[in-house]
Image (cartoon, helix red, strand yellow):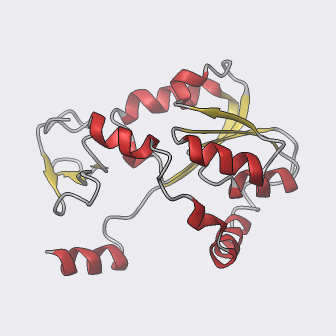
């Protein structure tokens, strides 16, 4: 990615901290304030698809309990109803398993084959796909809810990618999106520690 913001198309992207350990670069637009996690180079994509990416940390009981508490906070906006839910970037499958317990039919996709294997263990009823939402070829208007936990900041062209998300949603469907807050206290502390 160059210096052009994918949101406002201005040439105003700047680095917010030094490159990360795997080569990704958090960027922020000085014009609109929009942020993108990385320049989405091929080398970084290969990092995220390697089988040695450690998603097994999510199987630690303490971590799983913390995530379950997080998921419970969404119960009021995501009531049990038996529709189809798609989690993009399903990781170890913890949310998929929670959603099945709430009455959802679930689909998950991830670009990591290790994540897909762990998701299958955690949620055998899930319909899983290893690849991107574009590669999965989900039918138009086939999903009631799309869940995007900490995914959009890894996407090279968020606007184009979100069109793929919108395409699979039924009219009136729900999108749950969470992304890191560049200005939150832990992020500011890390930035202060690394310069």
Q: Is residue 158 left or right of residue 178?
A: left
**Which of the image's four quarters has the C terminus?**
bottom left
Say if residue 11 shows up in the picture. yes
Residue 7 seen: no
Residue farthest along the front direction in this orientation: 52
Q: Nearer the viewer, residue 18 or 44?
A: 44
Q: Quadrant of residue 128?
A: top right
Picture mark count: 0
- Pick the front one: 107 or 7: 107
**Residue 149, position as x, y percentages in the image:** 54, 53
| Residue appearing at x 87%, y 46% in the figure | 81
In x, y percent, where is residue 109?
Answer: 61, 38
Q: Residue 148 in the image: x percent, y percent?
A: 55, 47
Vertical placement of residue 65 versus 115, above or below: below
Q: Residue at 54% across / 22% down in the picture?
A: 135
Please state if 20 lies on the left or on the right of 130 as rendered.
left
What residue sits 27% from the left and 76% below the top? 190
Vertical side of 29 occupied by 195: above or below: below
In the rendered view of the protein, which quadrant contains the N terminus?
top left
Q: Which residue is painted at 84% across and 42% down in the image?
A: 125
Look at the picture and state if 64 lies above or below 29.
below
Image quadrant in which you'd find residue 77: bottom right
Where residue 151 sits: x, y (%)? 47, 47
**Nearest the eye: 39 or 50:** 50
């Amino acid at each position: 990615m160059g210096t052009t913001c994918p949101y406002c198309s201005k040439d105003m992207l700047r680095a917010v901290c030094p490159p990360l350990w795997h080569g990704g670069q958090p960027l922020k637009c000085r014009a609109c304030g929009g942020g993108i996690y990385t320049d989405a180079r091929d080398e970084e994509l290969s990092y995220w698809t390697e089988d040695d990416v450690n998603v097994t940390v999510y199987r630690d009981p303490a971590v799983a309990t913390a995530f379950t508490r997080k998921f419970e906070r969404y119960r009021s906006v995501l009531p049990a109803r038996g529709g189809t839910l798609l989690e993009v970037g399903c990781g170890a499958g913890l949310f998929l398993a929670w959603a099945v317990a709430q009455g959802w039919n679930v689909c998950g996709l991830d670009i990591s084959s290790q994540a897909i294997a762990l998701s299958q263990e955690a949620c055998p009823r899930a319909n899983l796909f290893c690849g991107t939402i574009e590669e999965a070829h989900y039918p138009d208007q086939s999903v009631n809810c799309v869940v995007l936990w900490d995914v959009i900041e890894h996407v090279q062209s968020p606007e184009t990618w979100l069109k793929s998300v919108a395409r699979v949603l039924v009219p009136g469907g729900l999108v749950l999106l969470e992304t890191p807050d560049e200005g939150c206290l832990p992020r500011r502390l890390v930035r202060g520690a690394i310069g």
